[in-house]
Image (cartoon, rainbow, N blue to C red):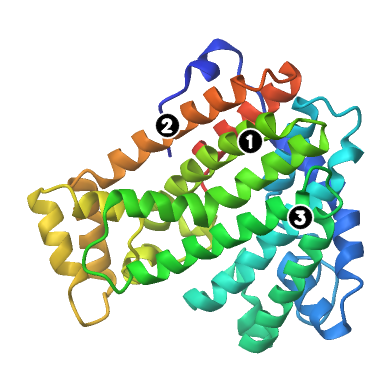
Amino acid sequence: MVTQMSRHATAMPARDAHPVLDQARAAVAVGYRAAVGRLPAEIRHVAGYHAGWWDADGAALDGGGKALRPALALCCARAAGAASPAAALAAAVAVEVMHDFSLLHDDVMDGDRTRRHRPTAWVVFGVSQAILAGDALIALAMEQAAQVPGGGGAVLSLALVDLCAGQCADITFERRDQVTISECVDMADGKTGALLGAACELGALAGGADAATAGRYRQFGRHLGIAFQLVDDDLGIWGDPQRTGKPVGADLAARKRSLPVVAALASGTPAGDLLAGVYRRDEPLDEEAVTYATALVEAAGGRSWARAEAARRVELAHAALDATRPDEEAAADLRALAALVTRRDH
């Protein structure tokens, strides 16, 4: 993970972001479950399984995601002057539901068979059911976003278009021999940055921010989203499977053009040239080949570049946040979330 600390992190004692995430998870649970509860029974069952609320047979579980996006929405609302967290609950629910939609469809497109240490929804219920559940989640997310003043529905719909564009680019890159770092960063900005940016913008609008100020909160989220994707790509190659829930080197085995890989391929180094040869192979990459490719990415500087770029993006995020003149207590929580994003191990 990124080890370089920002000037903000060194200027004050470390703040624990986990209580912020826990509060956000609890805050959105009722609204999210109520929204899913209005779905037809079969689709509701798939959506609840994917969200981690029950197993394939409907037995209750206490699962779920990290709640980063709703936490950002709620904190940005506070930072922008919201008198009560309730003002941003619709924004928080909207971004969490939209995030879960993206994961449902992403698992289908990537053929991923596990998520959060158990079979993915499409493996359990079939591809068609998973796609339909994802479609239903989009509708629920837009319904929630429409409740946010200042054009919340438009904010989330534009983010969805950017998210789809980023995902499309990610898929396209797998079939291309050459991808530039700039193209890959743009992909990450859409695939991950768009929804984090929308979470922050929706939260700020719910907190009473004007359009210009809400746009600065969006920039905070989008820079943070790119940093998040850089760390995610690091974990996709070097992460501990016991923590990530994915096999070792899964992204390399799939020949994904992740950010560290693209940086390595563009490095002009002997290791980068050897990596290009590995990626051009027709046969599947076995465990030995994945281990070799992992070493080449690091030797070509892909990992060090990704970590440095993640740190730079966090600094840009902090600068955008500072420009909003936020409530300092809420801003401290947002900086803690940014630190957590770049130091996570799963």
In this view, 314 is above or below 255: above
Residue named by callout 2: 311
| Cα separation between marks 2 and 1 | 22 Å
Q: Which of the marked residues, 1 or 3, is nearer the chain's N terminus?
A: 3
Residue 209 pos. (x, y %): 76, 30
Residue named by callout 1: 215
| Cα separation between marks 1 and 3 | 15 Å
Q: Which of the marked residues, 3 or 2, is nearer the chain's N terminus?
A: 3
Residue named by callout 3: 153
Q: Are marks 2 and 1 in contact (CB under 8 Å)?
A: no
Element assignment for label 2:
helix
In this view, 278 is above or below 236: below
* Nearer to me, 195 or 155: 155
Residue at position x 42%, y 46% from top? 230
Residue at position x 85%, y 29% from top? 82
* Nearer to me, 182 or 5: 182
